[in-house]
C-alpha cells in the first residue's frame, strides 16, 4: 500500500467509493451507440425530464452566472417552508440531499461512534459514517422491511444517529405512521433520527414526520429535487429540522453549496404541481405494469412505493451486462449484498415495454 495511507485517516482504507448508475455517455462510448438509443433505468430519475417551468427559470439565470449565488437561498427556502408549513430557519440546502447526510455526519460523528440503519438501507449512510470513522450497525430487515423495533433495540450510548429511508432505496418498502410513532416513543434524546424521504412525493398517503420537527425532537427530514422534480443533474436537496439543529448543520457547509441555477430551477419546479402530478401518474402506471409483468414471468419482486422496483433475476450482474449491450442500463445490487437482484427504475411506458421485451428474451426459457 502506498505510504500516503500512513498519513491518511486509517478508516479511509475501508471506504469503498459509491458506485453510481452507469452514465448514458459511458455506455454510448463503449458500445459505439448514439446517446439517444440508450435507455437509462438505473438511477430513479424522472423519465419526463425537468418541469418546463424549471427549465425556463434556469435559462433566465444563466446570464447571471458571473455572480455568486444567494448563499442563504432566501426565496427557495421560503418556498420550501411554505410548502411544508415550516419556517425558513427550519431548512438547510445541500448539493443533493446526499450532502446534507454528510453535514449530519460532520456535525455529530466522532471516530468510534455508532450509527444504526437497516441491512438493506440506502448505502450512502454507511459510506458517510465510515468517512468520519464511525461504525455502522446494520439491523436485519426481514422481507426487506425496516424492523424499527429491532433498530430501536440496537441503540446504545454510543449511537449518535439512526437513518431511516422511507420509502427505502433499493427496496421500495414503506414504513407506516404507527411503526414510526412507536419507534419515536423509544428513541432517547442523545440520538438524531434522520428520515430520508427522497421519494416522499410519490406516496398517496405519506406518513407525517415533520410533526417531530415541530415538537422539537432531534429529527432531520431529508427531501430532494433529484427524483420527482427531475433535477438530479442540478444537485440540490434539503434537510428539515428545528432551528437550532439547522443552525448547527449550517456551520458545516461551504458558503455557496447550492448554486444559483439549481436554486432557480428548484424554485420553479417546486411550484409546478402539474409536472409533479404527471410524473406521479406515469410512475404509478409504469410500476403497476412492471410489477404485473414480473408476476406473470414468475420473478420475485418487492412491491414498491417508489419509482423503481427490486426484482430477483438470477445473476444480477450478468443481466445488467446483457441489457447494457442492448442499450438498456439498470442497476445490479452487488453493492447491497444482493447479487441475485436488480433494481429497475420506472421509465416512460415505451421504455418500460422495451426493457421488458429485452428482459424476457434474456431470461432462461421455462421448462
Ligand atoms: C436518490 C436518493 C437520495 C437523493 O440524493 P440527492 O443527493 O438528493 O440526489 C437520497 N436518499 C435516497 C434514499 C435516495 O434514493
Image: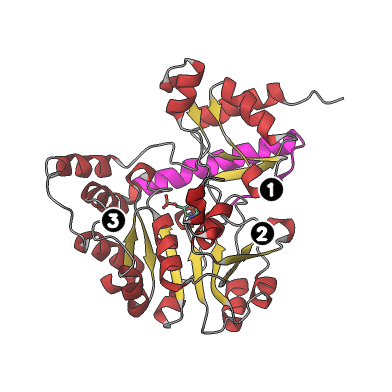
- Say whether marks 1 and 2 touch (CB < 8 Å): yes
* Residue tagged 1: 337
- The magenta region covers 275-304
- Say whether marks 2 and 3 touch (CB < 8 Å): no
Q: Residue at x 21, y 64 (%)?
A: 72
Q: Position of residue 240 (x, y in %)?
A: 38, 68
* Residue tagged 3: 257
Q: How is the image coloured?
A: secondary structure
Q: Residue at x 65, y 41 (%)?
A: 291
Mark 1, Cα crowd under 10 Å, few <14 / some 14-19 / many 20+, is few
Q: What residue occupies the far top of the structure in this picture?
A: 32
* Residue tagged 2: 119
Q: Position of residue 269 (x, y in %)?
A: 30, 49
Of label 1 and label 2, which has the lower sequence position? Answer: 2
The reply to whether residue 119 is visible in this rendering is: yes
Q: Between marks 1 and 2, how big is the CA–CA gap?
A: 9 Å
Of label 2 and label 3, which has the lower sequence position? Answer: 2
Query: Looking at the picture, does residue 315 appear above or below residue 7?
Result: above
Q: Position of residue 203 (x, y in %)?
A: 51, 56
Q: Quadrant of the N terminus?
A: top right
88 or 205, nearer to the observer = 88
85 or 74, nearer to the observer = 74
Q: Position of residue 233 (x, y in %)?
A: 36, 42
Q: What residue occupies the far right of the structure in this picture?
A: 367
Q: Quadrant of the C terminus?
A: top right
347 or 281, nearer to the observer = 347
Of label 1 and label 3, which has the lower sequence position? Answer: 3
Mark 3, Cα crowd under 10 Å, few <14 / some 14-19 / many 20+, is some
Q: Residue at x 44, y 36 (%)?
A: 47
Amino acid at each position: 500500500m502506498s505510504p500516503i495511507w500512513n498519513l491518511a485517516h486509517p478508516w479511509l482504507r475501508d471506504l469503498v467509493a459509491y458506485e453510481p448508475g452507469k452514465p448514458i455517455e459511458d455506455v454510448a462510448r463503449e458500445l459505439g451507440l448514439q446517446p439517444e438509443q440508450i435507455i437509462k433505468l438505473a438511477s430513479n430519475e424522472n423519465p419526463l425530464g425537468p418541469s418546463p417551468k424549471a427549465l425556463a427559470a434556469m435559462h433566465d439565470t444563466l446570464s447571471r452566472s458571473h455572480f455568486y449565488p444567494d448563499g442563504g437561498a432566501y426565496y427557495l427556502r421560503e418556498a420550501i417552508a411554505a410548502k411544508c408549513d415550516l419556517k425558513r430557519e427550519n431548512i438547510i440546502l445541500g448539493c443533493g440531499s446526499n450532502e446534507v447526510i454528510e453535514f449530519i455526519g460532520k456535525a455529530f460523528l466522532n471516530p468510534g461512534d455508532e450509527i444504526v440503519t437497516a441491512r438493506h438501507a440506502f448505502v450512502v449512510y454507511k459510506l458517510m459514517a465510515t468517512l468520519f470513522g464511525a461504525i455502522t450497525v446494520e439491523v436485519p430487515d426481514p422481507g426487506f422491511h425496516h424492523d424499527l423495533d429491532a433498530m430501536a433495540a440496537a441503540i446504545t450510548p454510543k449511537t449518535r444517529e439512526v437513518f431511516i429511508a422511507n420509502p427505502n432505496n433499493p427496496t421500495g418498502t414503506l414504513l407506516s405512521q404507527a411503526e414510526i410513532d412507536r419507534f419515536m416513543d423509544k428513541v432517547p434524546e442523545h440520538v438524531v433520527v434522520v428520515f430520508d424521504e427522497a421519494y416522499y412525493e410519490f406516496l398517496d398517503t405519506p406518513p407525517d414526520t415533520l410533526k417531530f420537527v415541530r415538537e422539537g425532537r432531534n429529527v432531520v427530514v431529508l427531501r430532494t429535487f433529484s427524483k420527482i422534480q427531475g433535477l438530479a443533474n442540478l444537485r440540490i436537496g434539503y434537510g428539515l429540522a428545528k432551528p437550532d439543529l439547522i443552525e448547527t448543520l449550517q456551520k458545516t457547509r461551504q458558503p455557496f453549496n447550492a448554486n444559483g441555477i439549481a436554486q432557480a430551477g428548484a424554485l420553479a419546479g417546486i411550484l409546478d404541481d402539474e409536472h409533479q402530478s404527471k410524473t406521479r401518474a406515469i410512475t404509478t402506471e409504469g410500476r403497476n405494469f412492471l410489477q404485473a409483468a414480473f408476476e406473470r414471468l414468475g420473478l420475485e419482486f418487492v412491491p414498491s412505493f417508489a419509482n423503481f422496483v427490486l426484482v430477483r433475476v438470477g445473476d444480477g450482474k450478468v443481466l445488467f451486462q446483457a441489457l447494457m449491450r442492448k442499450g438498456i442500463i439498470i442497476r445490479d445490487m452487488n453493492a447491497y449484498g444482493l447479487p441475485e437482484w436488480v433494481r429497475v427504475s420506472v421509465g416512460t411506458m415505451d421504455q418500460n415495454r422495451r426493457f421488458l421485451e429485452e428482459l424476457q428474451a434474456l431470461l432462461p426459457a421455462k421448462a
